[in-house]
Image: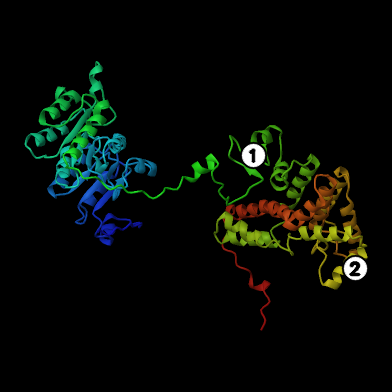
């Protein structure tokens, strides 16, 4: 009974990994051909590493020769280069060999069989795993040595190793034309070093059909003469005592006959069948077939990027461009999920333009300027300004709309509304300005009101807000309607006058914070501008002047 561990650790150096896990003796190298040789040599030099599997293709031949020479001199094993790895059935696998979980089950790789298999080709390894599983009790171990000209270990290396493993009762070899690796196996068979049946086939017999020399998929799959041809190798293996079929198509039946003969002779006891644990069906496959309904983590109703082009509220991007939609139209699709009339989307754009900036002295711009002068990046500077938006700065649009709507819908007179708010200790949102007054009105408010009078079918909420302003101005000269109050009341008129929103939808829009979103979007333009302005001017770190601070005890 051996202990099995699965480590999931990350190390910057091979030496550190080996020192941390001294019992790990197999190194699987997934590095590219550019660094595979150097990292493999580093692994071979570690005293704890016995086997190095090199997955990369294209490792320079000179580098491969150096690795092989060092490994043999130090009694170590290289699998590859250009290997998919190997598998010991029922135990573990290295590299990508054996394929998916479904393939592992079909090839009976979840428990050991009686066949040792070695191949040059990784792709054909998976094919032969399946073939062997159909006509025998399965493989005990399978290795793909790689198709390079100079493999780190040879076919005969693994056949001789299988010959010394009691559980392996027969061997299957799949070679290919090119090189002389198969002849080392021929010599081993002739010298009697292999006592177990060997079924072998060398692929590439079709090469003779070509008039010129053909390079097949692997670097080493190129016949350099008659001795390197698939036919010559197959005949040499047959003469040495291997069981060689007449064609690749006959390989399966030959494997079956060899296995059944060993069973009849009592050399292979029945392998107890193990029922593998049920493998859950892949979620994507199950969803596609309609067997399961997976819970979604996010619900999106405003956009969809799954088709050939993104859609905003069902409107393709190409349509948005072809119809000349503006920023207001895009906001209407993404925020309100419908295409609003042009006068509505133009009003949205006017709000954005009028609220984009209000000079460097307001709190949002001041924060962004100070942050930018501290050397911070654009996003940090923008966010520092946005964080000041709230009930006292730019964030009163929703509240203004909410209170004006409630008062108007309940039929309150301006006097009842203002005095009721005063009793509650609440300032009337949208009313009051630090600079503007009765005789110095906010030009932005006037522009918005003029546009609404010209284009809106109804301005009942704005007219009510003006009546409230008239009353508050009788209290103080600076209690004028500000831009928050103008946008809040006019947006109520836009929503109700367009006929595209129910009363419930209007209440939800105000409650969620849509209208403040307009100010946030607009003011972001100005805050970004102030950030760029300070960086362009290369302004130093800001320090507030002492004379502007009242120091008290």
- Residue 213 seen in render: no
Q: Nearer the viewer, residue 196 or 193?
A: 196
Residue 475 disc label: 2
Res 230 quadrant in image: top left
Residue 311 disc label: 1
Q: Residues within 10 Å of mark 2 (few under 14, many from 20)?
A: few
Instruction: State the residue at coordinates (17%, 47%).
Output: 165
- The tag earlier along the polypeptide, 2 or 1, is 1
- What residue occupies the far top of the structure in this picture? 211
65 over 16 or under it: above or below: above
Q: Secondary structure at mark 1?
A: strand
Quadrant in which the N terminus is drawn = bottom left
Q: Nearer the viewer, residue 227 or 452?
A: 227
Q: Residue 307's x, y, as percent?
A: 59, 36
Horizontal side, residue 285 vs residue 269: left or right: right
Q: Do the residues bearing badges 2 and 1 touch, measured as CB atoms within 8 Å?
A: no
Q: Residue 480's x, y, as percent?
A: 85, 61
**Front: mark 2 or 1:** 1
- What residue occupies the far bottom of the structure in this picture? 553
216 over 151 or under it: above or below: above
Q: Secondary structure at mark 2?
A: loop
- Residue 412 seen in render: yes
Q: Residue 443's x, y, as percent?
A: 82, 53
Horizontal side, residue 167 vs residue 551: left or right: left
Instruction: State the residue at coordinates (88%, 50%).
Output: 459
Residues at marks 2 and 1, CA–CA distance in whole angstroms: 51 Å
């Amino acid at each position: 009974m051996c202990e099995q561990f699965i480590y999931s650790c990350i190390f910057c150096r091979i030496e550190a990994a080996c020192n941390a896990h001294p019992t790990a003796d197999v190194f699987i190298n997934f590095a590219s051909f550019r660094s595979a040789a150097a990292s493999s040599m580093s692994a071979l030099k570690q005293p704890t590493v016995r086997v190095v599997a090199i997955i990369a293709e294209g490792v320079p031949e000179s580098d491969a020769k150096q690795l092989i020479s060092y490994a043999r001199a130090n009694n170590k094993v290289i699998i590859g280069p250009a290997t998919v790895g190997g598998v010991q059935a029922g135990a573990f696998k290295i590299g990508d060999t054996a394929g998916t979980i479904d393939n592992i089950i079909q090839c009976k790789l979840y428990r050991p069989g009686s066949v040792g298999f070695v191949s040059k080709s990784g792709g054909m390894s998976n094919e032969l795993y399946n073939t062997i599983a159909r006509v025998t009790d399965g493989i005990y171990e399978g290795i793909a040595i790689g198709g390079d000209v100079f493999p780190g270990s040879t076919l005969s290396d693994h056949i001789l190793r299988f010959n010394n493993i009691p559980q392996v009762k027969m061997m299957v070899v799949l070679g290919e034309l090119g090189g002389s690796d198969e002849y080392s196996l021929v010599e081993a068979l002739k010298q009697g070093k292999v006592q177990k049946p060997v079924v072998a086939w060398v692929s590439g017999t079709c090469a003779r059909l070509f008039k010129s020399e053909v390079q097949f998929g692997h670097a080493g799959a190129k016949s350099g003469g008659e001795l390197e041809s698939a036919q010559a190798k197959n005949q040499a293996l047959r003469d040495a005592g291997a069981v060689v079929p007449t064609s690749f198509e006959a390989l399966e039946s030959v494997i079956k006959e060899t296995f059944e003969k060993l069973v009849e002779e009592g050399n292979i006891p029945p392998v107890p069948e193990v029922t593998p644990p049920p493998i859950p069906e892949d979620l994507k496959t199950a969803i596609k077939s309609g067997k399961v309904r997976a819970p979604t983590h996010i619900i999106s109703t405003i956009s969809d990027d799954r088709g050939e082009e993104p859609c905003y509220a069902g409107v393709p991007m190409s349509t948005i461009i072809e119809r000349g939609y503006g920023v207001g139209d895009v906001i209407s699709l993404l925020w309100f999920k419908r295409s609003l009339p042009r006068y509505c989307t133009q009003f949205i754009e006017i709000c954005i333009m009028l609220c984009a900036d209000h000079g460097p002295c307001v709190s949002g711009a001041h924060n962004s300027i100070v942050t930018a002068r501290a050397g911070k990046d654009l996003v940090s500077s923008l966010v520092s300004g946005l964080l000041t938006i709230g009930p006292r700065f730019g964030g009163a649009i929703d509240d203004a709309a909410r209170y004006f709507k409630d008062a108007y819908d309940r039929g309150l007179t301006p006097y009842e509304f203002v005095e009721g708010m005063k009793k509650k200790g609440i300032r009337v949102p949208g009313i009051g300005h630090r600079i503007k007054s009765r005789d110095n009105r906010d030009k932005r408010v006037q522009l918005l009101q003029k546009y609404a009078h010209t284009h809106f079918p109804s301005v009942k909420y704005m007219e009510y807000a003006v009546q409230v302003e008239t009353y508050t101005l009788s209290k103080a000269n600076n209690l004028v309607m500000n831009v928050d109050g103008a946008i809040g009341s006019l947006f109520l008129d836009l929503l109700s006058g367009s006929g595209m929103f129910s009363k419930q939808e209007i209440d939800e829009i105000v409650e969620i914070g849509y209208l403040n979103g307009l100010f946030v979007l607009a003011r972001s333009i100005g805050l970004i501008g102030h950030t760029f302005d300070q960086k362009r001017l290369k302004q130093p770190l800001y320090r507030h002047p002492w004379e502007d601070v009242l120091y008290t005890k």
